[in-house]
Image: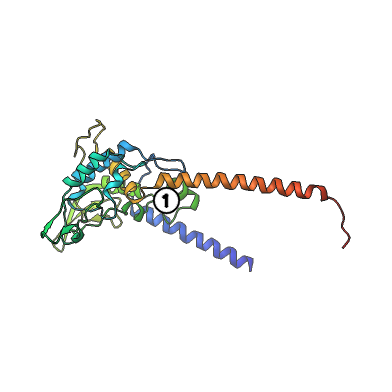
Amino acid sequence: MMKKLTLSALTALGLSAGAAMAAGDAAHIHDVDFSFEGPFGTYDQMQLQRGLQLYTEVCAGCHGLQYVSIRTLADKGGPMLPEDQVRAYATAFPVNDEAANMHLYDYDEGAARTLTSNDHFPANHSQNAPDLSMMAKARAAFHGPYGTGINQFLKGTGGPEYIVGLLTGYTGEEKEEAGKIYYENTAFPGGWIAMAPPLYGEDVEFADGHSNELHHEAEDIAAFLMWAAEPKLEARKHAGFLAVVFLIVLTSLLYLSNKKLWAPHKGKKFNL
């Protein structure tokens, strides 16, 4: 029986390793040292603001963020924009897909109303492109399903790394199939993607003077999309840390109480 169990376990490990190697061959993604990784990691406020600028000026033309509320741009742990800037940002943001945002309309006047900070980012299906609200959590890289639990706890699922790899993985090669152009990408499963390179480097000018080289822009937008997918990351880590401290203290008190209660009776023999 033990021999069969051992053989089964080895087979399962072999299959998992093979699958992981196959996944690694299909997509080349490198690790990125993001500030929010690890149990005590936090978002870089300036990086999130740069990512917001990249999303607004580059990505919003094709992709929406329909599950993200605009007012969260002012929240602690996020881009932390001043309230007046958030309100101004909401009024200037275009409604890209009217059919998908019927809740943004005033039926009495029959015209689109101006967005407010209480609204969500508008959806955008004009290019049949996926919404980016949960992209950083939906796509896992090398820390994903083949990683161990402790690795995912320390480094996450690798979604931001996948985004960086995708944005920097274009080789410049193109092919046409069924009248559609595909672009070679070393990070995309299968190697070919229908999305043209969205970033080339020096796409925007950052107010803080940060480098706008391609890999820096990719890291900034990946960090912003990670925040969009998990805006309460810092609060969750803080709550988890307090919970662990509470459990340690409680365990210590229970141990000491148990020791004190039973110490007088230790070693005594009782007649039953």
Quadrant (top left/top right/bottom left/bottom right) for the C terminus: bottom right
Q: In this view, does 93 lie to the left or right of 226?
A: left
Q: Which of 96 and 242 is in front in this view?
A: 242
Q: Find residue 168 and report its horizontal and vertical position in percent.
A: 27, 44
Q: Residues within 10 Å of mark 1 (few under 14, many from 20)?
A: many
Q: Mark 1 points at which residue?
A: 143
Element at label 1:
loop
Q: Which of 191 and 131 is in front in this view?
A: 131
**Residue depicted at x 26% and y 48%:** 70
Tell which residue pokes out farthest to the front in this image.
108
Toward which corner of the image does residue 46 lie, by quadrant?
Answer: top left
Q: Which of 169 and 232 is in front in this view?
A: 232
Q: Find residue 195 and report its horizontal and vertical position in percent.
A: 20, 53
Toward which corner of the image does residue 77 lie, by quadrant?
Answer: top left
Q: Nearer the viewer, residue 161 or 100?
A: 100
Q: Is residue 15 visible?
A: yes
Toward which corner of the image does residue 57 lie, by quadrant?
Answer: top left
**Residue depicted at x 31% and y 46%:** 72
Quadrant (top left/top right/bottom left/bottom right) for the N terminus: bottom right
Q: Is residue 198 visible?
A: no
Tell which residue pokes out farthest to the top in this image.
209
Q: In this view, does 5 lie to the left or right of 111?
A: right
Q: Find residue 143 and report its horizontal and vertical position in percent.
A: 42, 50
Q: Find residue 124 and report its horizontal and vertical position in percent.
A: 20, 56
Label 1 sits on what residue type?
His
Q: In this view, does 140 lie to the left or right of 248?
A: left
Q: In this view, does 12 lie above or below 40?
A: below
**Residue depicted at x 30% and y 51%:** 187
